[in-house]
Image (cartoon, grey):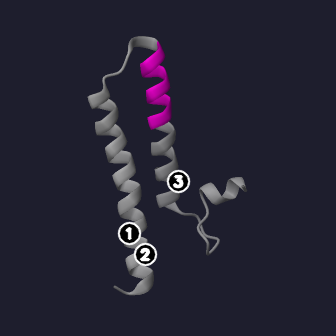
Amino acid sequence: MNWKELIIDPNGSLSHTKIWSNIGMATLTITYVVGTYMHGITPELMVAYGGLVVMGRATSKYLDKSVSTGE
């Protein structure tokens, strides 16, 4: 895997969607690790935050696909 793939889209331009999606996933991972090992984190909080990050990414992928196919 090339590190550029995390921020560059297939056309070779900088992708803000990829940048913020990866920042969200990294934040989710850090929140989970720190929250679990430091003071305990509630499952409700992880589901809520994880849902926001994952649904944002899924919605972005859906919109990219629908725009590229012309739907």
Circles 1 and 3: CB atoms closer than 8 Å: no
Which residue is outermost to the bottom?
70
Task: Give the Cα separation between the discs numbered 2 and 3.
Answer: 18 Å
Of the two numbered discs 1 and 3 in the rendering, the one whose residue sits closer to the viewer: 1
Name the residue tied to disc 1.
62
| Label 1 CA crowd tier, 10 Å (few <14, some 14–19, many 20+) | few
Helix, strand or loop under label 1: helix
Question: Regarding mark 2 in the picture, which secondary structure is present there?
Answer: helix
Which residues are drawn in magenta? 28-37
- Residue 68 is one of the magenta-drawn residues: no
Tally of numbered tags:
3
Q: Position of residue 18 (x, y in %)?
A: 52, 57
Instruction: Give the amino acid type for the residue marked by disc 1 in the picture.
Output: Tyr
The reply to whether callout 2 and callout 1 are in contact (CB within 8 Å) is yes
N-terminal of the pair, mark 2 or mark 3, is 3
Q: Are marks 2 and 3 in contact (CB under 8 Å)?
A: no
- Residue 40 shows which numbered tag? none
Give residue 65's mark: 2
- Please give the name of the residue rendered at 40% of the width and 80% of the height, measured from the top-left corner: 67
Left or right of residue 11: residue 25: left
Compared with 39, 69 (above or below) is below
Q: Residue furthest right?
A: 2
- Residue at screen point 51% across, 39% down: 26
